[in-house]
Image: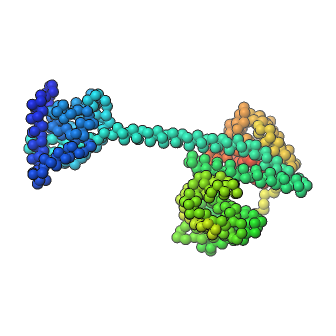
């Protein structure tokens, strides 16, 4: 064979001769090994002409001996144009040194095989000078005339383009999802702020003596506000789940207490509709478990709420059992039932049975989707069985660790209500919204607490420096200085001066898990979420000031 350093392209006679020699060597070698000398020409032509991948054979000096139809399509050269020329013709100038090093490393290897090896993504150079992304598989074979190399070439331009388009689509979808989640969180905050005024004042008015007609109208306002709050909570949960910011807790809780509390929540509504509402907990399911009781109760609330809502007459039943290491909770009803078609998409977002369901019962169609996501986050599953007119059964299976029976807790005196500390409570509120200022002032004054209200975090820090406080309720988003910043300053000055720690609770509509973690990192002791629930507000005050008073 000619030297690899030969200069200039070969002539037509040299190309034809090298082509014949290469084909002859290949035919002879393959014929001996395959035992098919009569049909070898047809087999070889079939492989070369049918394969959409390019097949290139080069000698040990890297001169091209064979160039298939597929290679012609990929590189734009015809076979006669490249036969006898160096393989570097098909490699960009700046990549030839690296290619030569790879080939030398491959040639020096001990393994001799016709199988493809050393697959990698490389770039080829076409006749028109275009860079072509290709995938190359090399094999080497020792023949009587020396080493020959076979390369299988595949054009991956379309694959790379499809991959780039897919990555772009994923990137755009991720950005859109993040924007949606941010929008939902912002919308939740902006709607919760005025809703705090509606529900807060409704609770304040409900504590007064009202004529029956006015009390009835006030109840409509309260129920409507709570329905809107429920929708907001669902959308906020959805945004947290999709953003991956919903973290599950692992706490020890008593299942009986949780189930009984959930049952009590809906007993009055079921009785009002004339429904039989039963609860059965097997003995083997009783006791304590490790899991997230808040999220488990959220799932049960959703399932029982739907069962009561969609059942006009008959029965709603909750069965709790433990089977094969799984906690199994089934919620059955004798309600309207679900069609087979609707059942297939029941756990999808924004889905309900049909449009009439939405018009008649309201809701967003998020409840069951959130149940499914929460159950999956607990490594469990949820399923539904139903038929039109025959009710429905929803079953939740959770691999919660059963830690045994819970011993009865010793009786401890309850924390005294906040009203007992009325003459002594020094309570500072940092709140910039005028309506919310009026709500918190009204609620506190009804139990004899006269709060001092400041409009921003800077004023809260100044008030803290002037006067000792039993408790500070700190809004988060405020002008001049936000709540977490103000809290951090107070905590630092407490440490610098060796002062006692003043309880500080966030008073905010931003109550996502990661946000609460940020408040605690800033030095806050807890959270009072907006819209304010009066019982939780007073419980927080009692808990915070009892040790100090």
For the N terminus, the quadrant is top left
Left or right of residue 265: residue 208: right
Q: Is residue 33 visible?
A: no
Residue at 67% x, 47% y: name it: 511
Q: Is residue 316 visible?
A: yes
Left or right of residue 381: residue 233: right
Residue at 68% x, 44% y: name it: 188
Q: Where is residue 479 shown, x and y percent of the image?
A: 72, 33
Q: Where is residue 136 shown, x and y percent of the image?
A: 27, 41
Q: Where is residue 417 shown, x and y percent of the image?
A: 82, 55
Left or right of residue 37: residue 545: right
Instruction: Name the residue nearer the viewer: 37 or 190.
Output: 37
Instruction: Name the residue nearer the viewer: 175 or 281.
Output: 175
Identify the image quadrant of residue 266: bottom right
Identify the image quadrant of residue 405: bottom right
Q: Where is residue 411 shown, x and y percent of the image?
A: 75, 66
Residue at 9% x, 35% y: name it: 17
The correct choice, above or below, for 32 with respect to 86 in the image is below
Residue at 39% x, 38% y: name it: 161
Instruction: Name the residue nearer the viewer: 423 or 458.
Output: 458
């Amino acid at each position: 064979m000619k030297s690899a350093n030969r200069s200039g392209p070969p002539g037509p006679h040299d190309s034809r001769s090298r082509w014949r020699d290469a084909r002859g060597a290949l035919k002879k070698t393959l014929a001996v090994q395959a035992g098919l000398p009569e049909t070898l020409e047809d087999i070889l032509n079939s492989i070369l002409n049918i394969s959409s991948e390019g097949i290139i054979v080069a000698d040990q000096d890297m001169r091209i001996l064979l160039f298939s139809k597929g290679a012609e399509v990929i590189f734009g050269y015809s076979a006669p144009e490249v036969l006898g020329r160096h393989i570097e013709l098909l490699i960009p100038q700046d990549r030839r040194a690296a290619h030569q090093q790879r080939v030398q490393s491959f040639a020096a290897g001990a393994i001799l095989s016709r199988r493809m090896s050393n697959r990698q993504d490389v770039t080829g150079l076409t006749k028109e000078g275009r860079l072509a992304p290709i995938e190359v598989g090399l094999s080497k074979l020792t023949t009587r005339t020396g080493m020959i190399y076979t390369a299988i070439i595949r054009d991956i331009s379309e694959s790379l383009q499809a991959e780039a388009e897919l990555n772009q689509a994923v990137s755009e979808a991720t950005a859109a999802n993040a924007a949606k989640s941010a929008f939902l969180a912002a919308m939740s905050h902006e709607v919760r702020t005025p809703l705090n005024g509606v529900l807060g004042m409704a609770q304040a008015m409900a504590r007064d003596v009202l004529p029956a007609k006015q009390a009835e109208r006030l109840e409509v306002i309260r129920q409507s506000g709570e329905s809107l709050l429920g929708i907001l909570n669902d959308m906020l949960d959805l945004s947290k789940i999709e953003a991956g910011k919903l973290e599950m807790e692992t706490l020890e809780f008593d299942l009986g207490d949780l189930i009984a509390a959930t049952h009590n929540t809906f007993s009055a509504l079921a009785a009002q509709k004339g429904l039989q509402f039963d609860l059965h907990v097997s003995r083997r399911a009783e006791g304590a478990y490790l899991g997230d009781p808040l999220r488990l109760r959220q799932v049960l609330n959703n399932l029982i709420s739907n069962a009561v809502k969609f059942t006009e007459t008959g029965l709603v039943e909750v069965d709790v059992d433990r089977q094969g290491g799984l906690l199994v909770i089934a919620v059955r009803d004798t309600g309207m039932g679900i069609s087979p078609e609707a059942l297939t998409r029941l756990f999808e977002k924004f889905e309900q049975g049909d449009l009439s369901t939405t018009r008649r019962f309201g809701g967003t169609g998020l409840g069951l989707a959130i149940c499914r996501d929460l159950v999956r986050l607990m490594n469990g599953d949820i399923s539904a069985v139903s038929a039109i007119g025959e009710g429905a059964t929803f079953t939740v299976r959770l691999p919660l660790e059963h830690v045994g029976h819970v011993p009865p807790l010793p009786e401890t005196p309850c924390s005294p209500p906040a009203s007992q500390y009325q003459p002594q409570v020094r309570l500072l509120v940092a709140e910039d919204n005028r309506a919310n200022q009026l709500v918190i002032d009204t609620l506190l004054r009804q139990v004899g607490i006269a709060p001092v209200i400041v409009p921003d975090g800077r004023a809260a820090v100044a008030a803290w420096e002037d006067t000792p406080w039993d408790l500070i309720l700190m809004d988060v988003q405020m002008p001049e200085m936000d709540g977490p910043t103000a809290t951090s300053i107070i905590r630092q000055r407490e440490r610098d001066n060796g002062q006692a720690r003043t309880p500080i609770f966030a008073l905010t509509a931003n109550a996502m898990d990661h946000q609460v973690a940020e408040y605690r990192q800033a030095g806050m002791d807890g959270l009072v979420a907006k819209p304010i629930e009066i019982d939780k507000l007073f419980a927080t005050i009692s808990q915070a000031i009892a040790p100090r008073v």
